[in-house]
Amino acid sequence: MANDTITPTPTINHVTFRNPDMFWDIAADIYLPVDFDETKTYPAVVSAHPIGSCKEQTSGNIYGAALAEAGYVVIAFDASFQGASGGTPRFMEDPAQRVEDFRRVVDYLVTLPYVDADRIGVLGVCGGGGYTLASAKTEKRFKAVVSITGVNYGRMMRDTLNAGDGVLAALRGIAAQRTAEARGADTAVNGMLPDSAEGAQAAGDIDIVEAYDYYRTGRGESANGCVLFEAAHGANALAFDAFHLAEELLDQPLLVVVGDKQGAFGAFRDGKEICERAASEDKQLLVLEGVSHYDLYDQPNGAGEALKTVIPFFDAKL
């Protein structure tokens, strides 16, 4: 689905910034409201991309653009070590860093004179949705929280490895790779997707099939949406739980959007779980019928329908 089937193309400012605690830059795209006036202040939304993805994909070109059309300043950012953001090794997926990035983005956002610092929301897609939920537990500058087909990345990885012995074997492999690299070996990078559409079909799971279609065809492919993962620093992800202490700490107004066509990534089950567990008194689980995980990235029946609830939600809560 082309972006202009949801919203006209907004004005986008490409920025980089660095916090005092960082040795690298974060790259972001700022989507400005239609008829933007720099002398006014606007509510803002931080938008987080899926795992293996980048700001140019669904978090920016779909949700960022639509929210800007609705009157919001939206900042879609690349995670540290990924996309156009800095940091080495490349393609590192460290949940602690991913969560800290949200705070760094808000630190930058509140310096912009046209942003109302008391009206900031957050939205994330897929793994970015899980990280959004994790960050909102402790980042209370977020006044409203939206998860779009959000996935608890640590849970997903443990399930993929069949938990138990599979996880322990993976941790031993990570330890061996880290030792090898400490002794001079090259960095190891793994791909999550099959090498061909036929390989994706052979996997027999809707999420894998549609992930290939999104990331490896003209539908959604981007130079920075590599779906690659650095191996030697993957241990933290296997011990990560985005929902830990949600019963105590996740108290902002919450909207969780999932489709009912379930696949291996587990967004449907994660969405139900976080809505049950979150401390938020104001929370909603929106289940879209006949919609898959990747429909919620860019398709009219998925992302288009989700936005019909997401925009009014932010309007009411911000």
Image (spheres, rainbow, N blue to C red):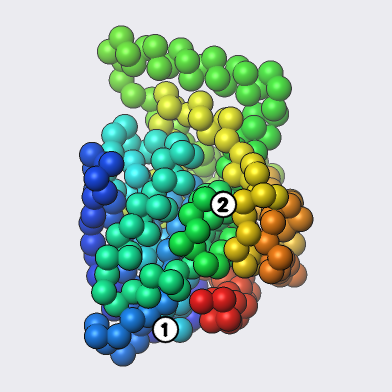
Q: Residue 269 in the image: state x and y as whole percent.
A: 74, 51
The label on residue 10 is none
- From this view, report whether residue 77 is shown above or below residue 283: above
The label on residue 137 is 2
Residue at the image position 33 percent from the left and 41 percent from the top: 81
The mark that comes first in sequence, 2 or 1, is 1
Q: Residue 207 in the image: state x and y as whole percent.
A: 63, 51
Q: Quadrant of residue 284?
A: bottom right
Q: Which residue is mark 1?
A: 71
Q: Tell me the kind of residue under disc 2.
A: Lys
Q: CA distance from mark 2 to mark 1?
A: 26 Å
Q: Residue 21 in the image: state x and y as whole percent.
A: 28, 41
Residue at the image position 54 percent from the left and 14 percent from the top: 172
Q: Residue 244 in the image: state x and y as whole percent.
A: 64, 42
Q: Tell me the kind of residue under disc 1.
A: Gly
Observer-nearest residue: 188 or 271?
A: 271
- From this view, report whether residue 176 is shown above or below residue 49: above
Name the secondary structure under disc 1: loop
